[in-house]
Each structure stands twice: as structure tokens, then as C-alpha cells.
Amino acid sequence: MYKGKLITFEGIDGSGKTTQIRYLESFLQSIGHEVLLLREPGGTKIGEEIRKLLLDMKHQEMTPETELFLFEAARAQLVREVIRPALQEGKWVICDRYMDSSVAYQGYGRGLPVRLVEVLNSLAVDEMTPDLTILLELGPAARAERLSRRHDSGQGDRIDVETERFKQRVCEGFRAIADAEPSRVVRVESLDDKEETAELIREQVRRVLL
Ligand SMILES: Nc1ncnc2c1ncn2[C@@H]1O[C@H](COP(=O)(O)OP(=O)(O)O)[C@@H](O)[C@H]1O
Ligand SMILES: [Mg+2]
């Protein structure tokens, strides 16, 4: 029904998503696909406004429920305004975070009922479930070291300044998703060698989608 493919990247902040998405984009283009890169929250005018609300450090009073609804609202807009039309046109869409981040962050991290998060996810994404999800995994020490060297990190945003215990729960959530849906979600270790990691990801893409 849809000619294109949807690939999502998940994993905690600093796990290498943005870096690896660029490698995969080049690879897919080199074999002749038209690629569209998106990030969540964002990717639409409404979504970028919601992104500002969600990440702004000044909104410390935001409740977990509000946070969940805002992510789902941005996602619903992105799916209908951008992702579905792109897939219909045959594009390969790569999204930096998607529905699994809500289960991991708002469910496991914030403690909202995972079943409810899944129900809202299904409303937001409709039938646009990813064809493949790459879960990038990296231990806390290596992650801290990489983030300390990242030049774009600035002051951090409202969600990445959370505690290490929160981040551990998020990682546990991602692992639980991968265990529950092994045919869609593939765990890939974010190695120190970026090119080697990119090859591990290309192997998964070839195996599942090409
Ligand atoms: N394999 C790697 N080895 C060392 N540093 C890396 C590696 N991959 C990414 N980085 C660096 O780690 C930081 C976080 O990576 P990034 O791709 O921005 O992660 P994310 O998008 O998941 O937050 C960046 O500064 C990036 O350049
Ligand atoms: Mg990133």
C-alpha cells in the first residue's frame, strides 16, 4: 500500500542517533532512494512549536500527563502532514525518535501506565508503525563522555537534564520494547567506531528491508 519505508532511531540522548542517521541517509541515497529526515518532537510547524514548549527549561511545572499529550499531539500532526504522504510518494523516511520514546520516557521514565501510552501511540501513528527501528545502546560512562564533548549540547533541555536513575529507567524501557517486538526493533551497540556502527545498521537494513 505504501511504496516507501519508515525507519526510526531510538535510544537515550547521546547514544549516537543523529550521527548514525546521517550515515544511513548517505547509504540509502547511494543506492537510489529518496530520503526524508525527520525528528521528534517537530517536523511540522505545529510540531516545532510543541517542541519549544516541551524542551524549554522554564516549564518545570509541566506534568507527565501534559508532556505525554504534547508528544502525542506533535506525532499525530507529523504522521498525517508529513510521514504518510512521503511514504505514499515512495520516500524512505528516517525519524530521530518516534513512538517508542513515549513508552520509554513517559511510561518507564515518568511512571505513566505503559498500556495508556501505547493506546495514545496507536491513535497518533495510526497504521504508520515503523518498518524497522534501530535502538542504539551505550553504557552510562561512555554516554557521559560523548555528551561532554558535544558542542551543540548547550545548557541541555528540560528532559535531558533528568537524573541518571531516570535515564536508567528509560533504557530499561527501550530494552523491554525490543524484547517484546524483536521483528521490528533491533538493538545495535553504539561502538566507539562510528563507521563500524554504521555498517551494523546497514546490515540490519539490508536484512529487513532490501
Ligand atoms: N561512535 C562514536 N564514538 C564517539 N563519539 C561519538 C560516536 N557517535 C557519536 N558520537 C558523538 O557523541 C555525541 C552524541 O551523538 P549524537 O549522534 O548527537 O547522539 P544523539 O543524537 O543520540 O543524542 C556527539 O558529539 C557525537 O559526535
Ligand atoms: Mg540527536
Image: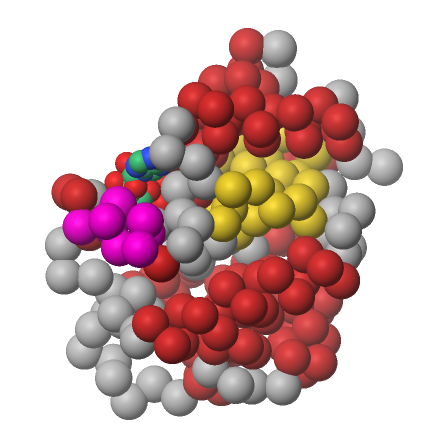
The residue depicted at 54 percent of the width and 17 percent of the height is: 27
Please give the name of the residue rendered at 79% of the width and 47% of the height, measured from the top-left corner.
183
Residue 203's x, y, as percent? Answer: 65, 25
Task: Give the main secondary structure of the magenta stretch.
Answer: helix
Is residue 14 or residue 128 the one in the foreground?
A: 14
Q: Nearer the viewer, residue 35 or 150?
A: 150
Which residue is at a point 26% across and 45% down the rendered structure image? Answer: 146
| Picture quadrant where residue 4 is located | top right
Judge whether residue 205 is colored magenta: no
Answer left or right for 174 relative to 19.
right
Rendered-image quadrant of the N terminus: top right
Colour pattern: secondary structure
Looking at the picture, how far across and down is residue 80, in whole percent?
63, 53
Residue 104 placed where, x, y %?
54, 69
Q: Nearer the viewer, residue 203 or 121?
A: 203
Residue 135 in view in this figure:
yes
Q: Residue at x 57, y 41 (%)?
A: 188
Residue range highlighted in magenta: 141-148
Position in image of residue 167 (x %, y %): 40, 69
The answer to whether 156 is drawn above or below residue 108 in the figure is: above
Quarter of the image for residue 8 reads top right
Quadrant location of residue 76? bottom right
